[in-house]
């Protein structure tokens, strides 16, 4: 099969399109013929060696996919060859094929194509688990940093589906967009301090930026409120000092995937694609992702 691989940490130039061995599904796994793969910021952060995790070279990057089941491994029930699916794989998705455990796979929403479905894992799933684990309910005030990004845009829509009042930040070019997906109070983060006038008024902050943005977010949260950052280790001790629940990111189950798919098929939630590149242009896709400030997710397409 064709696959993107790299043999050492480095810049986008380490990504190479080459021939790799097609994987074989093991017990409880399915083999997926990938149609599209999501490009997540974590992909290039791992490529640069920024994550403290064991790496075995060569690496096929990527975890998010959408495609068609090619075959099923021993012990698999409920999924069959030919079904259109999406989900998460730890075996790399910048390739024509990957394998994934059945509990990380769900049927693709019928109302969208493979490219849109490839934006769900790592985007919608992260947002869904954050909103669900924070216990968001009608009337809560939810503050989402990067409301137009690959995670933020889904978080806005999930929070609104719960009846929350949503505050969101974005750049000036995305103000109208984040309002269109449900942000009640849109803040242009380039126009002044996002925290002005919001001290201790927010029930939950979802931080997708980190650094100074995370630091300046603490005064917004009500005592007993919650915070989740997807940019690094959860600041548990700081949360204890502030009287704030610090949540951890968790992986979505296949039931979570199915619930998200239903919201998409019923028109409650909409995916947003920032850009599509062919598999062979993974370097260009990573350069685009590292630049940041886009709307929605970048996707690699392996077939038309």
Image (cartoon, rainbow, N blue to C red):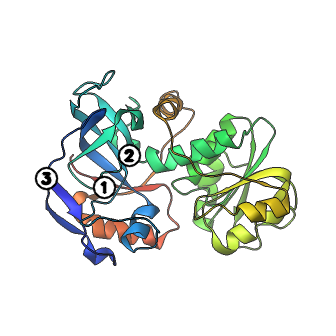
Q: Which mark is residue 300?
A: 1
Q: Nearer the viewer, residue 91 or 237?
A: 237
Q: Nearer the viewer, residue 215 or 156?
A: 215
Density class for disc 1 (Cα within 10 Å; few <14, some 14-19, many ≥20) is many
Q: Is residue 238 left or right of residue 289?
A: right
Q: Is residue 296 left or right of residue 171?
A: left
Label 2 residue SS: loop
- The span from disc 2 to disc 1 (Cα, nearest Å) is 9 Å
Q: Is residue 181 visible?
A: no
Label 3 residue SS: loop
Residue under numbered circle 2: 118
Q: Quadrant of residue 20?
A: bottom left
Coordinates of residue 176 in the picture (x, y in percent): 62, 55
In the image, what residue occupies the spot 15% across and 55% down? 2
Chain-order first, disc 2 or disc 3 = 3
Q: Is residue 167 left or right of residue 256?
A: right
Chain-order first, disc 2 or disc 1 = 2
Q: Which mark is residue 270?
A: none
Coordinates of residue 255 in the picture (x, y in percent): 50, 30
Circles 2 and 3 in contact, beta carbons < 8 Å: no
Coordinates of residue 242 in the picture (x, y in percent): 84, 62
Circles 2 and 1 in contact, beta carbons < 8 Å: yes
Coordinates of residue 112 in the picture (x, y in percent): 39, 36
Q: Which mark is residue 21?
A: 3
- The span from disc 2 to disc 3 (Cα, nearest Å) is 23 Å
- The span from disc 1 to disc 3 (Cα, nearest Å) is 20 Å
Circles 1 and 3 in contact, beta carbons < 8 Å: no
Chain-order first, disc 1 or disc 3 = 3
Label 1 residue SS: strand
């Amino acid at each position: 099969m064709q696959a993107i691989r790299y043999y050492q940490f480095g810049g986008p130039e380490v990504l190479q399109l080459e021939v790799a061995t097609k994987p074989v599904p093991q017990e409880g796994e399915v083999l997926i013929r990938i149609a599209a793969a999501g490009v997540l910021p974590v992909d290039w952060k791992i490529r640069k060696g920024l994550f403290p995790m064991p790496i075995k070279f060569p690496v096929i990057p990527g975890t998010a996919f959408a495609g068609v089941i090619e075959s099923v491994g021993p012990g698999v029930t409920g999924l069959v060859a030919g079904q259109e699916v999406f989900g998460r794989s730890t075996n790399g998705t910048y390739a024509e094929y990957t394998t994934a455990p059945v509990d990380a796979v769900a049927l693709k929403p019928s109302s969208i194509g493979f490219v849109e479905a490839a934006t769900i894992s790592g985007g919608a799933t992260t947002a869904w688990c954050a909103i669900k684990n924070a216990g968001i309910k009608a009337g809560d005030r939810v503050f989402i940093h990067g409301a137009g990004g690959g995670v933020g845009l889904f978080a806005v829509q999930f929070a609104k589906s719960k009846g929350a009042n949503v505050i969101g930040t974005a750049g000036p070019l995305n103000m109208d967009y984040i309002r269109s997906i449900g942000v009640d109070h849109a803040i242009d983060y380039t126009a002044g301090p996002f925290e002005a006038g919001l001290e201790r008024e927010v029930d939950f902050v979802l931080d997708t930026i980190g650094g100074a943005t995370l630091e300046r977010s603490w005064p917004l949260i009500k005592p007993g409120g919650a915070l989740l950052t997807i940019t690094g280790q959860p600041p548990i001790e700081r949360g204890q000092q502030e009287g704030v629940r610090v949540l951890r990111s968790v992986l979505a189950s296949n039931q979570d995937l199915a619930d998200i798919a239903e919201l998409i098929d019923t028109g409650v939630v909409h995916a947003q694609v920032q850009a599509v590149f062919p598999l062979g242009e993974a370097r260009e896709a990573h350069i685009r992702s590292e630049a940041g400030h886009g709307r929605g997710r970048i996707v690699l397409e392996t077939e038309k």
